[in-house]
Image (cartoon, rainbow, N blue to C red):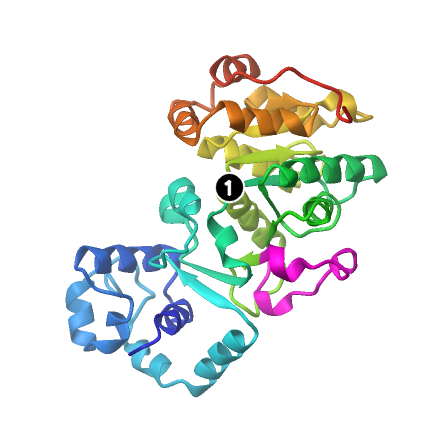
Amino acid sequence: MRNKEYSWYMLSNAPGFGEKCIHHIYETLQANNKSINYLFDTDINELFRLFPEIGRGKKFPRADFSCFPLLDNNDVLYSDFEKLKTDGVTIIGLDDERYPKSVLQNMGDNAPPILYCKGYLPLLNQKSVSIVGARDVGNFEITITKSIAKKLAENGINITSGYAKGVDTSAHLGALEAQGTTTMVLSFGINHITIKRELKDLNWEKNALFVTQFAPNEKFSGRNAMRRNKLVCAMSKAIVVIKSGQERNSLGIMSGTFDAGKSALKMGIPVFVLSPKILNPPPQGNIDLIKLGGIEFSNGMDIVKFFEEHSEQDLASKNSKRDTKTTNKKKTTNKLTLPSQKSLFD
């Protein structure tokens, strides 16, 4: 019987088959009660009959099923797949029951068709909170980040972040130091993983998961980092912003942290923003995200209590009614009652 993971891997390597095209193919297969293996087990003419839009017209002109037999007989491609499996990498396609349900819910047709994962796979669907922030931060911000991550981890919440330096690494480290779990979402292919010095001495293999939407050999890029941020948001029940620059700096460069917070708000995911008054100088991005609907907080327990007081169904109902174009802080706090504010280190 054909390996379903390999069928997804071949499809991801098919020239001209982008994410939108793969989503279309998957939805058509579902509607016809066919599995992903059908693509490589059937006659090409039958594929063109079932998918008349592929390779014709304006919708998916670059895709061509004639490459499928070549992929199926490509020894190098199969060798690369076997190497991934030997390295402990699992390929999770849209039809896999382990695919994160929150990503499908929050991203819809923009959800990555394939996730490359290494580590503890149950974390894909564990209750998670993402902690995001600037790369260049001082000891004070690092201490705050680790303190919040530890508090959440001690309360059974998985910590998700983007595995960048600064806030991201501090969030992962704080969770692991508390004997909690963490998900590291990469902005590059899984073949480029290097274990950060801060994490090498910890037992990360049993409580951590690497996830990436990018091809195994793809390198880091700023564009990939922005796309990664959306996946970080979609995998979580809430986002915690530690320190954000303004949406765009004087050179017009967008802040990745601000973009993550804004993306989460658009998805209807609660965004907790560390009170600007705690940091010196107050980060403009934090101020602006609160104006857009972010929830100002000063203590990790505020977030824990928030989840205790609001069921997932309650959050889904309230968030579906939010309009991020008009939402402000006052409207947000009226809809979602917040715990009383406390000192960060109480």
In the rendered structure, which amino acid carries the disc numbered 1? Lys
Task: From the top left corner, tell me how far across and down residue 61 is, in percent.
Answer: 30, 63
The residue indicated by pointer 1 is 127
202 magenta-colored: yes
- Image position of 128 with respect to 33: above or below: above
Name the residue rendered at 50%, 58% in the picture.
121
Determine the image quadrant of residue 211: bottom right
- Image position of 15 with respect to 259: above or below: below
- Image position of 254 with respect to 210: above or below: above
Name the residue rendered at 78%, 43% in the picture.
136
Determine the image quadrant of residue 170: top right
- Image position of 311 with respect to 37: above or below: above
The one nearer the camera, 294 or 337, is: 337
Task: From the top left corner, tell me how far across and down residue 8 is, in percent.
Answer: 37, 68
Total labels drawn: 1
The one nearer the camera, 332 or 204, is: 204
Residue 254 appears anywhere in the view = no
Name the residue rendered at 67%, 17% in the picture.
341
Find numbered disc 1 in the image and state the secondary structure of the residue it sits on: loop
Neighbours of disc 1 within 10 Å: few (<14), some (14-19), many (20+)? some
153 magenta-colored: no
Q: Is residue 113 left or right of residue 220?
A: left
The one nearer the camera, 274 or 96, is: 96
Quadrant of the snapshot with the C terminus: top right
Please report the bounds of the magenta region as a residue range.
Answer: 187-209
